[in-house]
Amino acid sequence: MPVTGFLTDSTLCIGCKACEVACKEWNDVPDDGFVWSGLSYDNTLALGHSTYRHVKFVEREPKSGCGGNAGERVTWEFSSDVCKHCENAGCLEACPTGSIVRTEFGSVFVQPDICNGCGYCVVSCPFGVIDRRPDDGRAFKCTFCYDRQKAGAEPACAKACPTGSILFGRLDDLERAADRRIAQLHASGMTDAAIWNPKETSVGGTHAFFLVRGDARAYNLPPKPEVPTTLLKQSWSAAAMAAGAMVGLSLVAFLTSSNSRRGAK
Amino acid sequence: MKPHIPETRLDEIRNQAALGQLDAKGVRPPGSPFPEANSYYGLPIVKPPVWTWEIPLYFFTGGAAGASSVIALTAQMTGASKSLIRDARWIAALGAAASGPLLILDLGRPERFLNMLRVFKPQSPMSVGAWTLTAFGTASAGAVIAELLRMKRAGDAAAFIAALSGLVMATYTGVLLGATAIPVWSRHARSLPIHFGASALSSAVSLLVLRGHDEQALNALGLAAAAFETYMGIEIESGDDVESEPLRKGTTGLTTRIGGFFSGPLPLALRLLGIRSKRARRVAAASALLGSILTRVAWIEAGKASAADPRPHLL
């Protein structure tokens, strides 16, 4: 099976939220609250236990050059966020039940019949994607439409996207497509367009990666995400040290005090 | 009563609105440039822990039980009093017995708790913890049951296994928090296991003291633990990193500070007095137990506050 991925191209996104709707309907995801955030047109706000696609509305002061007319006070950019399906996935490593697995498509999948809702994946995801659904008790996130991919179909969000902003395909094909698209954008003057895919960090790259303009931090895409397993060695070493100290101190305490007791008597 | 707004303010508001840039507090009109530079409206990046009161309480019971089993073994090895060994074993067994239900209660699907034992994943502290608790619970219960049945050799063997797994019980919870994406926890990945280990040792000693054991060794162990807790408090207070802010600011900072005071300086002073005074040892024990519980609560709550802050991730 080829490893598949998502390339989300924010320069093509029109913020229609068709991906959010398609995902919700296909995967039968419950509502995630009906709130007016006041933050641009974004009332979804974040990925979560009942939000597998989230369109971000990024408003910025226009820079001279391409993007935004001179008279405009802000530029308005959109990008559809999704589970990154990390190469080294924090949630997958953390899962104590083996509920979270790597599928034949290279995606990270939560088996709902195994998950017991321990909540450890929630704090192990460096992107705040996976969460526990309170009324259900289990953890949920983007399934990468595992069921559809099994049947040879593309994920619901990619199919519903009207502008080709969400591209689905073989990961290596998408990476080449992204390079071509960047070259094209740079040639047309959008020199601030860049790929966000943290390959050089311990995450080791993501299967869902993004083409955004300017500072990716404006999209809450962290520049240096790290998978928490990198902390295991130092933390377990400290635990071993603490355990050793506990045994050592106890032995010393009992030996010296029994001596002093004998001395006193 | 009408608020005092000068008439000129209304002109100012109209002019600003015409420019699309209202600067009033709490007003963010659509179309205005968002003020949080290099962040998505300052919204959180990671998710807060979903854990409720059961988890900090489990950290306390599991830690105290684990350290108690270590005391039971070292006391036995050095020929300490039989009643101390027996009580330490009982505290380990009862603590383990309380720990299991607490962990199961916190699951989103408690009826599926056995799925924890489907696989063993050394790279998951949660998996290591689930297996350790299983081993510890069995061994510590075995130790006291064997003693009741007057099977000394079996009891000693079980107590030995309980102490080995007890060492993990007392410290692994620090790794559990440390090896996560929550900034305030991962920042302390190196110190949390020692911190929680010291807290566990202090609780075990305190329970034994309150049970009426007056060995100076217990007081000495409590002194060592309280000294480390005092050092930990100083380290937290003297830091100025953005990751550790929840340990210093707001409600979580206050809880950390109160928990730290009852775990560190107060029992340290009282246990120094306790070298001579029995009453000081008792008060120190009560203080350390309260401090241990508060400290565990503070770390979980600090994790929740830390998850809400996107700054550490965007540096």
Image (tube, rainbow, N blue to C red):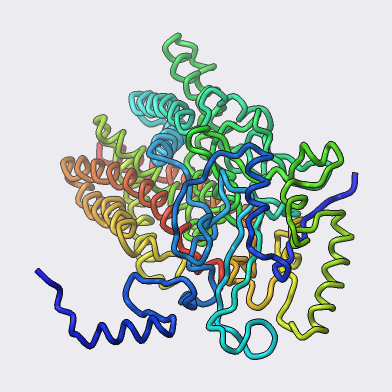
Q: Is residue B98 above or below residue B307?
A: above
In this rendered view, identify the residue nearer to me: A139 or A242.
A139
Tell me what residue is drawn at x 44 percent, y 48 percent. B196
Q: Is residue A111 above or below residue A106?
A: above
Horizontal and vertical percent position of residue B27: 36, 71
Taking A102 as reference, is B83 left or right?
Answer: left
In this rendered view, identify the residue nearer to me: B30 or A259.
B30
Tell me what residue is drawn at x 31 percent, y 33 percent. B208
Horizontal and vertical percent position of residue B124: 63, 43
Label tally: 0
Taking A162 as reference, is A71 left or right?
Answer: left
Q: Name the image quarter holding residue A234.
A: bottom right
Q: Is residue A184 above or below residue B279?
A: below
Horizontal and vertical percent position of residue B219: 30, 44
In this rendered view, identify the residue nearer to me: A121 or A60.
A60
Tell me what residue is drawn at x 38 percent, y 31 percent. B80
Q: In the picture, which quadrant includes the N terminus of chain B?
A: bottom left
Taking B71 as reference, is A182 left or right?
Answer: right
